[in-house]
Image (cartoon, helix red, strand yellow):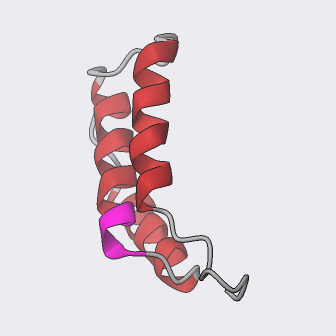
Amino acid sequence: MSLDVKIGQAIKDAVSEAGQSPALARRLIAWMEAVTSGNVDLADTDAGERHLEVLYGETSVGDDEGND
């Protein structure tokens, strides 16, 4: 099963509205596609942690002065 196009677009829209990098949307979509295709075992906590580390690395949380 592939990821529904509407889900992919919703991820892109949400990431954009949050002021995040388009790379974050691409990584989220890639992860979701891997999950829906059965290539990722959601019970594999080590793999989940690796995916989350990549996503956290792409996520912007504000500047050094605490401004968003």
In the rendered view of the protein, which quadrant contains the N terminus? top left
Locate residue 62: give its quadrant: bottom right
Locate residue 23: give its quadrant: bottom left
Residue 28 horizontal side relative to residue 37, left or right: right
First to last magenta residue range: 21-25
Percent position of residue 37, x then y: 27, 28
Percent position of residue 51, x then y: 41, 35
Residue at 37% in and 30% down:
35
Percent position of residue 53, x then y: 46, 40
Magenta span dominant secondary structure: helix
Q: Nearer the viewer, residue 14 or 8?
A: 14
Residue at the right extreme? 66
Magenta stretch encompasses residue 55: no
In the rendered view of the protein, which quadrant contains the C terminus? bottom right
Q: How many marks?
A: 0
Q: Nearer the viewer, residue 10 or 64?
A: 64
Percent position of residue 41, x then y: 40, 15
Residue at 35% in and 41% down:
31
The answer to whether 8 is drawn above or below residue 21 in the figure is: above
Residue at 46% in and 65% down:
11
Residue at the top extreme? 43
The answer to whether 65 is drawn above or below residue 46 in the figure is: below
Q: Nearer the viewer, residue 26 or 35?
A: 26
Residue at 69% in and 86% down:
65
